[in-house]
Image (cartoon, grey):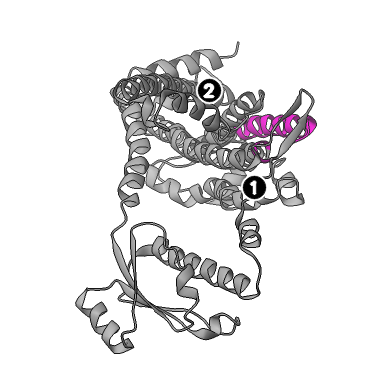
Amino acid sequence: MSQIPVIAHREYTQRVRSKAFIIATALGPILMLVLLAVPILAAVFSSEEEARTIAVVDQSEVIGDYLDFPGNYEVEETRQTIDELRARVDAGELSGYLVLPPSLLSGDGAARYYSRGGGGIMATERIEDSVRDAVREARILQTGAPDAVLGILSERVDVQMIQITDEGERTDSTQILAVFGYFMGFLIYICVILYGAIVMRGVIEEKTSRISELIASSARPFDLMMGKVLGIGAMGLTQWLIWIFAGVGLTFVAGLVLGSVMDPTLIDGDAAGAAAATPQFRQFLPDIPSLFPVYFLLFFLGGYLLYSSLMAAIGSAVEQEADAQQFMWIVIMPLIIPTVLIVNVMSNPDGVLATTMSLIPLFSPIVMVVRMAATNVPWWEIWLSLVLLAGAFVFAIWISSRIYRVGILSYGKRPTFKELARWMREA
């Protein structure tokens, strides 16, 4: 009779009742709130841009009339000499001075901005954009074009992307979903590393305490490896479910608190403006396909099971966690490769590279999730990838069990790759 359920239950209950699990589970939602609050606070504080005074030396005598600096900028047109302006910059009276030569109108020259440095990327981009817009307007008007032409050229044209599906038409949220897929792929990477390391550490602890010798006498190595991976996986899933429900609850409470202290008339001056803002905000929310969460969960679990079984194989081969470092890169590298190539997958999700990697079990937990978020993946590719992932997991457990069978009886020596291959053949 298989001992997998018994071993999985033991691993699950033992770890769920531990103080480390309880503390980590309790601190998880708090950490999530901090991670959400920090970018918001950073955006609020960074939006308060320091006031800047810029002197403009308009040698063209035309372009300066069309300069329009957004933000907290004060423009001062001057006829002072360059030496005088430089002295004012050194004294801190000016943030910098901008020189607009006459050759800008013909497209031969370049505007020059002098400052003591600083201001960040945003300040540089604002100055460049303002000068570029002013030169364009001056050139258009210099050709004798009426103001109506300038208005037409400045208008923004919106393009709505509509996706055709079997259920009908819906807004194409490819860009937003691609970013969402990137986040999901990175989440898989973090969880596989985190819980896979727990599996490896658990195997090493059993070998060190000789518990594995007692367990091995009553169960097959395959059952031991499978039960350990499934038990710790169930523990991780329990922890994430608690975090998700706690996060949803805290978000709901935060929404109630903000709703009670915020005045809806602050939006467009009346309550109707607040109501009208709701559908406008919803257009930025991605239209997630109905089966995407299901597929994400399947690939998430498949990736965890596959890499955890490989981590278990490493734990079976060594006696100390420090000894596992020489083997860890073999497991970590297949996770790093798709993470590095996520941008390429998002840019061309139907290309040969993305399609091939999404079918390779070591890459598919991350790449296929990103592909499904960025494009319409044929259903047979998704299921073929899942079947290959499941087969790779069973094969990895089989390899781990064969290493485990010999590894529990080998002490005092760090195995080499050649010896590991011999263990798998002779076990």
Numbered disc 2: secondary structure: helix
Could you tell me residue 350's position as x and y percent?
75, 45
Compare residues 269 and 185 and report the one nearer the observer.
269
Image-quadrant location for residue 195: top left
Crowding around mark 1 (Cα neighbors within 10 Å: few <14, some 14 to 19, many 20+) is: many
Q: Magenta span has 380?
A: yes
Compare residues 345 and 56 and report the one nearer the observer.
56
Classified by dominant secondary structure, the portion drawn in magenta counts as helix
Left or right, 336 with reference to 381 = left
How many numbered discs, if any?
Answer: 2
Q: Magenta span has 385?
A: yes
Q: Nearer the viewer, mark 2 or mark 1?
A: 1
Gap between marks 2 and 1 measured at Cα: 32 Å
- Look at the image and tell me in which quarter the N terminus lies: top right
Image-quadrant location for residue 97: bottom left
* Magenta span: 372-398
Could you tell me residue 57's position as x and y percent?
39, 80
Crowding around mark 2 (Cα neighbors within 10 Å: few <14, some 14 to 19, many 20+) is: many
Give the amino acid type for the residue marked by disc 1 in the picture: Met
Question: What residue would you read off at disc 2?
Answer: 230
As drawn, the residue found furthest toward the left would be 91
Mark 2 and mark 1 lie on one chain; the one further toward the N terminus is: 2
What residue sits 33% from the left and 46% below the top? 42
Visible in this render: residue 335? yes
Compare residues 187 and 158 and report the one nearer the observer.
158
What residue sits 65% from the left and 49% below the top? 157
Picture layout, residue 354 above or below residue 87? above
Question: What residue would you read off at disc 1?
Answer: 346
Picture layout, residue 139 above or below residue 360? below
